[in-house]
Image (cartoon, rainbow, N blue to C red):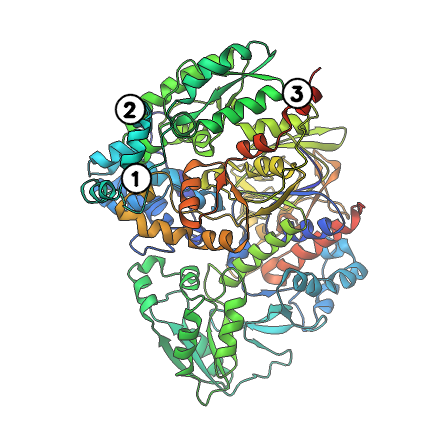
Amino acid sequence: MKFDTIIIGGGLSGLVAGIDLSRKGQKCLIVSSGQSALHFFSGSFELCSLADNPYEGIATLGAEHPYSKIGAESIADLSAKVKPLFKEVGITLKGVKDANHWRITPMGVLKRAWLTMDEYGTVPADGVMPWKKVAVLNIDGFLDFHTSYIAAGLEAKGVECSVHAISMPELERLRMNPTEMRSTNIAKTLTGDLIGALAARINEYAHDVDAVLMPAVVGLTSSTDVVKLKEKVDRPLHFIATLPPSVPGIRIQMMLKKHFQKLGGVYMLGDSVVSGEFEGGKLKSIKTNNHGDTEFKADNFILASGSFFSKGLASDIDGVYEPIFGLDVDSLDVRSEWYERNLFDAQPYMSFGVATDNEFHVKKNGERIENVYATGSVLSGFHPMKQGCGAGVSILSALYVSSLLKTIR
Amino acid sequence: MSKNKIDTSFEQCMKCTVCTVYCPVVAVNPDYPGPKQAGPDGERYRLKNPLFYDETLDLCLNCKRCEVACPSNVKIGDIIQSARLKYGTHKPKLRDYILANTDVMGSLATTMAPVVNFTLGLKPVKSVMDAVLAVDHHRTFPKYAGQKFETWFKRHALKKQDTYNNKVSYFHGCYANYNHPKLAKDFVKIMNAIGYGVNLLEKEKCCGVALISNGFKDQAQKQAELNLSSIRKAVARGEKVLTTSSTCTFTMRDEYEHILGLDNADVRDSINLATKFIYELVDAGEIVLKFKEDYVKRIAYHTPCHMEKLGWALYSTSLVRMIPGVNFMMLDSQCCGIAGTYGFKKEHYQDSQKIGEGLFKQIIDSQLDMVATDCETCKWQIEMSTGVPVENPISIIADALDVEATVKANQK
């Protein structure tokens, strides 16, 4: 079976590349082994969190950083495309291009963010709290949201908080199985006709407050329920991120995938690439676990297989390696140098990844593979946590590689 | 792997709970502990003491959607099914025997098909089956055909097959043999039209999927060994073994090894769904399909759970989309709720219908002439719950095929 581009990895980076290439008329295949890290999404995309203005932060990054390979000019062009791209998919993001705002973590701490899903509560760039008094609500028995942390964090910033737990008979039924009282199961319950009843329960606490904050447990498959709930609640309603799994993150994953398929893309979930046929400095075809001896051919390939979590990178006693093709990786030989003793320091292993040139071509045994590109968190040279650039690298490297590949009419 | 070595692949689970998100049962029945708890978490305890086995694992549909979703490649569904077979304490009932032994029942029923079909459809009979056997009265057993496919094939098609140079073997499965021989005849029709002769396997038994899910492991193993031995003979003759059921295919390719512990590596790649085989021939330019111009229909494809696990919906949908008059739609991939014999059981009926609710609504709202799907039990469930007719892609291709033009185009 022949495609223009085959993308290995169906998370944020792979899907953005797939959508952008499909828009250019390319016939794309995504092979994804299991669901992606979007299931742990915070609700916000970071571009660079080192400074108030993300571009000022980017200017301080070293030559090894993927942003430096893309270049300042392309970063500016491509980052302007992110909001419209997600709008097209059906996801509204808030935030401005050149100023970070603040997101509220499940621990009640403020962290810099670039673009945030519309339904989440955020604090503007100047750090001035937008509310004087809020109601912080939880679902009774939901263990992945800690109202006391949220309230403590907000109160430290001068916001008066009242904390309440909501119960409904349908949710009580879920509580019979405490280990499965998870955000996604709550979202599967709180949908359709129940939104009205939920709004009524919320409104009991929505008097004389500036806003109501609640865990992001509504709207698993579309934002319809979120929009309906916001309409029915008397005060502005904002979501706060829960501990994983992330309901809005799963919605983004589903909507990106759906959009990719709508544009003609083929998405194979639960399958993994087992081998590749290289010839004359090029990758000719791949074979997958599910499809046995069937060959999938393409002009170009994008490796968007993620980092250690997604098994895009792996390690054993001998070192760090890229498990699909055995591509060259940037890492450290001496194992003791992989870690810093202080957990909260920048951990060197987090910047390990596939070695690439300035156009993100990968290398195998020191030789550049001219039709294989790497994008997203499988790349080397950045610290997603310390530099606050994980989503930015995933999205912008995908758009950048896509811009290098041809349009097909 | 040696029998004494403990399989610790569950250690790969990082407790991320992604599997739970996609479990159709957890969403409708809080009594089910969920795939993470029932699978890798529970396994850790069961290895210490089998008393930790929880009978609610019977609520698992074996849809494998947890495995498809798992980012860490944990065989969650296999762990649960193996635990049921290893630690399950309650004995299978008469009802389970009847549901599981599809080919025994099929052989008995086809000889008296009109009587059996009539009787099984009677209200009082359904009430008795509901009360005595706990087969839910909402269900009607699929009708049995008066003549088995095998009988028809030997009488009417066998001779002609020798006239083709290319050959494939066909694993028809119980449904195409006893209930719906048209599907098997459609398969023969297409294969002959593209220049392939069809052989039956030397011996064929039910693939065993229902035996596995109803707790008859030893019998499943025996049947699997017999099938593998026939398949090996076909492969030795240089023939691929084709099927027209996604579940039979999945069971023989994956469950034989993962659940029954049989080594099928030598023939696994030779066991193929017919749609995959045909699509690949078209894709390679080796054959051409010609379709009737007056075949005009709006058709949506439903991805059976085991098709999702195989990852092969691509082939079936690509084939159906080749028909010029088809207005195609892809339904969201979700479980229909029947899961083979699961939904027939009185204790599961409500859950079964609730699981399928979203799918039924999408089908009813989509103004379809027909739903296409590769699984016979999905067909029964969707037809019963939506009233929309459901056909196997092979039957759709066969109906839309211009046989004469196709034969002509493929004569070398």
**Is A357 displayed left or right of A181 in the figure?**
right
The three-letter amino acid code for the residue at tag 3 is Val
- Say whether marks 3 and 1 touch (CB < 8 Å): no
Which quarter shows the N terminus of chain A? top right
Q: Determine the image quadrant of residue A77.
A: bottom right
Residue B237 location (% of width, % of height): 52, 10
Q: Which residue is mark 2?
A: B108
Residue B356: x percent and y percent?
42, 51
Distance from Cα at disc 2 to Cα at disc 1: 17 Å
Instruction: Compare marks 3 and 2 and give the one earlier in the sequence.
Output: 2
Q: Nearer the viewer, mark 2 or mark 1?
A: 1
Q: Is residue A293 visible?
A: no
Residue at mark 3 shares a chain with residue at mark 1: yes
Left or right for A224, reference B86: right
**Numbered mark located on residue A207 in the image:** none
Asked whether residue A22 is in view, the answer is: yes
SS at mark 1 in the image: helix
- Residue B406: x percent and y percent? 67, 24
Q: Secondary structure at mark 3?
A: helix
Q: Which residue is mark 1?
A: B121
Residue position marked by numbered label 3 in the rendering: B407
Chain for mark 3?
B
B177 left or right, relative to A407: left
Secondary element under disc 2, as helix, strand or loop, is: helix
Chain letter behind tag 1: B
Q: Position of residue A37 (x, y in %)?
A: 54, 54
Q: Who's the residue at 28% across and 24% down the image?
A: B108
Q: Tell me the residue at 68%/24% (across/down).
A: B405
Q: Report, in whole angstroms, how far the alpha carbon at label 3 lies from the one at label 2.
A: 38 Å
* Location of residue B312 with respect to B181 vertically, above or below: below
| Front residue of A108 and A204 | A204
